[in-house]
Image (cartoon, rainbow, N blue to C red):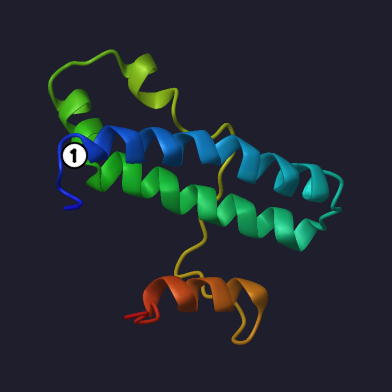
Amino acid sequence: MSYNNKTYLPFLSAECAGSVIPAYLPIIERRKDTPFNEEQKAWQQVRRGRYVEFNLVYDRGTTFGLKTGGRIESILVSLPLTARWEYDHKPEEGSEEWKLLDACINPKEWL
């Protein structure tokens, strides 16, 4: 059967969507009480800052809404409540944060 089959795709979509909650809830349950430190919180804030930067500067939907007089509150409500910016931030090489960025910037070729 072709993966582009119009009959198959809705079933595939439903199966994928139906798998999210059963797969994700055990992860949340296992991790919900995991403690974090100030350094990890600062890293989270820096990542949120990068998200805000992308959303306000590069995201076509957001920039379109801002340029065409869309409701500012509706556009900005998707932003995190807190974020942080550090000029030219680079995590320490070999740290968990560095490993994450390295994986994002240099993805593995799986095929």
State the image coordinates of residue 13 (x, y, percent, origin top left): 35, 37
> At 22% from the left edge and 16% from the top edge, which residue is drawn?
70
> At 52% from the left edge and 75% from the top edge, which residue is drawn?
90
State the image coordinates of residue 35 (x, y, percent, origin top left): 86, 53
In the depicted structure, whether residue 39 falls above or below residue 55: below
> At 60% from the left edge and 50% from the top edge, which residue is drawn?
45
Q: Is residue 20 left or right of residue 32?
A: left
In the depicted structure, whether residue 55 falls above or below residue 81: below
**Foreground residue, 52 or 85?**
52
Q: In this view, does 82 lie to the left or right of 4?
A: right
**Foreground residue, 1 or 66?**
1
**Foreground residue, 61 or 45?**
61
Q: In which quarter of the image is residue 22?
A: top right
Secondary structure of the residue carrying tag 1 is: helix
Q: Is residue 77 left or right of residue 71?
A: right
Q: What residue type is labelled 1?
A: Arg
Q: In which quarter of the image is residue 21?
A: top right
State the image coordinates of residue 29 (x, y, percent, origin top left): 80, 42
Total numbered labels placed on residues in the image: 1
Q: Residue under label 1, please give it.
A: 60
